Amino acid sequence: MSKIAKLDDIVSLCKRRGFIFQSSEIYGGLASCYDYGPLGVELKNNVKKAWWKSTVQMRDDVVGLDCSILMHPMVWKASGHADKFADLIAECKKCNTRTRVDHLKEKPLPSEAEGVTEQAAQHTEHIALDAAMAKARDLSNKVCPNCGTVGRFTEPMPFKLMFETQMGANVDDSMTMHLRPETAQGIFANFRNVLDTTRVKIPFGIAQIGKSFRNEVTTKAFIFRTREFEQAELEFFCEPGTDEQWFEHWKQARFDWYINLGLKKENLRFREHDIDELAHYAKGCVDVEYKFPFGSGDWQELEGIANRTDFDLRQHQRGIRTLNKWYESDGDLTNIELSNEAEEYLKGPLSYFDDQQKKRYIPYVIEPSAGIDRSALAFLVDGYDEEEVRGETRNLLRFSPALAPVKVAVFPLVKKEGMPDIAKNIYNDLKKHFNCFYDEKGAIGRRYRRQDEAGTPFCLTIDGQTLEDNTVTVRDRDSMDQIRVSTDQLTNDLRKKLDM
RNA sequence: GCGGGUGUAGCUCAGUGGUAGAGCGUCACGUUGCCAACGUGACUGUCGUGGGUUCAAAUCCCAUCACCCGCUCCA
């Protein structure tokens, strides 16, 4: 049975072994920012590789993309982020609890005993900031969900969730830009380019992995919610009417991905979004949740899979039509309205012509959007184990071979009789195929245990018998069992064991 | 941002006003014959940071930063 890991144990192990450090630690740290160390970068790269392999490489209907983080300001106008990507929060003066304004409920009036005044809470992310502010101004009848006090709130505080920066070294001539809050918009912006250059046909997807930035109101739990984070997103374009079946397809595919990489089934589940939780453009949304060991051991989201309909492509067609207003307003996004949709919007540049059906339409989009850092954390937490071996505690990370930072460690049993030379030769040969690690220092048991804690699946030991019959021992991380393998079969044998 | 907790060596922690410590880890040398072995030795500290009180501060006071838990939010 594996031990339930506490987050603190994981944080400590990550530091001790060089998986994850706090950013700018020598200066006292920078809130919410973390650095991946030598083992961590391997793990994270492996998570990305595994995602890319299953999402792009193994499929005939998905191509990749890598967009810039900075994009034309109008992208964020069209996507809605520039106006709407903000939360309004008010604080109860009595109990000092902060609550999102849109989550506050009215005190039921006596005449409406059924409580029907409770409106479905609409996510502020998708309400224009001005409108939300106006609507939120009157909190006199709202109830604090914490202490039940009515109408004693501070002025709603808006939070800008997008990072701003300046482009252009000339201060007078520089333009305010945003760091992307999601990678998805770069994909929509390149939809036409990909269509025109790759001979893809609907249904097909465009995949991208990259950094995004959000000024979260609060950060949380180590690398779980940070303001700078890495996403793996797929926009899968399909014909309207087939969207629900593709939604189901990706739900299953994405769930299986986590399981296949070793997450325990009992720690993973779907959570369907309620109707009133859905963004107004989304037809359906489900989260893949992992049972993280923070606090009370709550389920937390690893990935969201949404049916975004044709909303984004249609918005960008409106965005393109707004470009002149943007020039005229001297690049001030706040002063312009997004143009209305063209009457012929179905024939716009972001539409698709289906040659078989002789039909033009704007495709629907299924979007599985995964957090790479949180996935990495889930794999760390899920793989962490402590067990008693001869009265000693053995710490290990039971990584799937695909994720293990080091695949094979090579040791001479002792530093004599030519064992190090043989071991080095084997190491030099194997490292062409796998990420390997060589170590000839200290006791063999210690070397094994160190690799256990790094999650290395296999350790090879060159011993006295190697000198006689050219076999080495292959020691399995999880069982600690050893078998002898002939050196000329090592590569093949390990390939099989590692599934590489 | 609010409330609660924490911050001393790479890690875990002891140290409540008087010379900064332990265990583990790391490194070196010797030894080695398969699971954190043993011996000897070595390195490691802005006591989170800044200020104050004091003859004297890791210790008391103030401020600040960071982390954890809760509220909240999300990939």
Image: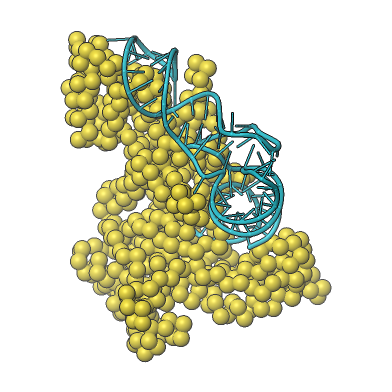
| Residue farthest toward the bottom in the current orientation of the protein | A328
Q: Is residue A243 above or below residue A452?
A: below
Q: Is residue A209 above or below residue A435?
A: below
Question: Could you tell me residue A384's position as x and y percent?
Answer: 48, 34
Tell me the quarter of the picture where residue A314 sits: bottom left
Relative placement, left or right, of A74 versus B64 is left
**Which is more toward the observer, A220 or A67?**
A220
Which residue lies at the image location 38% right of the left edge and 43% below the top edge? Answer: A37
Which residue lies at the image location 43% right of the left edge and 65% below the top edge? Answer: A181
Relative placement, left or right, of A218 versus A440 is right
Which residue lies at the image location 22% right of the left edge and 33% below the top edge? Answer: A431
Q: Is residue A317 visible?
A: no
Relative placement, left or right, of A260 versus A115 is left
Q: Colour of chain A?
A: yellow
Q: Quadrant of the C terminus of chain A?
A: top left
Relative placement, left or right, of A465 versus A102 is left
Q: Colour of chain B?
A: cyan
